Image: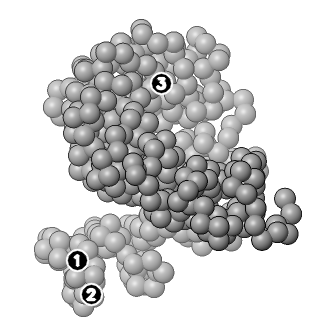
Amino acid sequence: MQPFAVSHISGRFISQLLSKRPGISQIKQIHAQIILQSLASTRLSLIDSLIHCYLYSKSLSSARIVFDNHRSSPPPPVLLWNLMMRAFSKLRHSSEPINLFRRMIDAQAKPDEYTFTFVITSCAHQDTVLCGQVVHGVTLKNGNVLNLYVANSLIGMYAAFARVGDACEVFDEMSKTDVFSWTSLVSAYAKNGDMFVSSGMYTEALGYFHDMFREFKQNEAVLVCALSACANLGAFDQGRWIHGCIDSNRALQSSNTMTALIDMYAKCGRIDCAYLVFDKITKRDIHNYTSMISGLSIHGRGEETICVFQRMLAEKLKPNDITILGVLNGCSHSGLVQHGSSIFYSMESSWGVVPKIEHYGCYVDLLGRAGYLAKAFGIVKTMPINPDVVVWRALLSACRIHSNLSFGERVISYLELLDCGSYSGTKVLLSTCMLL
């Protein structure tokens, strides 16, 4: 589309131009013409189309500006609210869908099932469950909670916060369920596995698994989610039964299911079974290797962790941050300081993995366990990321392991100099470090 050569074009022509989904530079030219000709108040459909185009071009900020200046009576149609919420809900931690939802309620516009689906999805990515609970209450008031998609969104939201009781309550009230309902519910169990074991809900969790498999055709998503739950619950027999289902159907033998199987067996304490699954994979990918490396590391088998890592590199596979974390953990539990140091200091230059707080924590733990307390302390003091409680605890734990009271007191003195207001957890550490 060429730049406009005339100073005045008709509203009808503008509408035709917008319907062709022009590029962002052309959209801005059209927007300027709408403003110059004062068409916003007389041709509301142009504003709707303009917002559509900005959203289509992923220019959310421009779409939001136009939407915020949308002045009409009655308020914008629900479709337009939904389009805005949907666009912002794709930004995982954005609170914009929630803000838009509040405005929508204040404007007395009636939300529909799509509105609730988008805003609940956004609530799942917030810091607390409170916002989702408020929206849940609004869905009950509006009678939308029984809608399949709204209910699935609620289960998924509660699963994100490991609120199993709330997820089950929504699930039990549904008149119709689908594979997403079951998968989200199982995900809630998987994320809160420890609670089920301690509170006697283990049998209930397994019951849901069997019901799900009976009601729906087995697919990758369901199996991976169920295996994740088994891993967190330590449900070895159940996981082995799912393994049998996968073996009996080659279509289910995907990279994701194999990765989930390796993880499940490792977390259930059967690293031998994890190895068998890993060795049977004909073409391994980074996810298979990472799962195997992480499994070996949690079992303290550092030498084997390094061997598998080297096999992965020999196959020209590039490790990710989780892979590196698994290798460093394995080195830490086996005292492989030289291997761990080499990997830590080359992870960014060799594989483009920038060290995160977790990597620093593992490296400090590796050095501390091996008795290199001064070096570990030096890493903590010079690391480019503010050390968190986990990092400091690893260092203090090393002092305790090596009965080095004087060095522990040195670390404590350093902690006392920190601003407790800006460093979360300092007071907690200082209250517990007296055990040194």
Give, as a three-letter code, the residue at label 2: Leu
Disc sitting over residue 426 in the figure: 1
Mark closer to the chain start, 3 or 1? 3
Using the numbered discs, state the Cα–Cα distance from disc 3 to disc 1 in whole angstroms. Answer: 42 Å
Nearer-the-camera pick, 380 or 352? 352
Percent coordinates x, y for residue 162 in the rendering: 29, 41
Using the numbered discs, state the Cα–Cα distance from disc 3 to disc 2 in whole angstroms. Answer: 48 Å
- Confirm or deny contact between disc 3 and disc 1 (CB under 8 A): no
Give, as a three-letter code, the residue at label 1: Thr
Give, as a three-letter code, the residue at label 3: Val
Nearer-the-camera pick, 194 or 24? 24
Residue at numbered disc 2: 418
Q: Determine whether the residue tagged by mark 1 lies in a helix, strand or loop.
A: helix
Mark closer to the chain start, 1 or 2? 2
Q: Determine whether the residue tagged by mark 2 lies in a helix, strand or loop.
A: loop
Disc sitting over residue 222 in the figure: 3
- Confirm or deny contact between disc 1 and disc 2 (CB under 8 A): yes
Residue at position x 65%, y 16% in the image: 250
Disc sitting over residue 73 in the figure: none
Percent coordinates x, y for residue 239 in the rendering: 42, 23
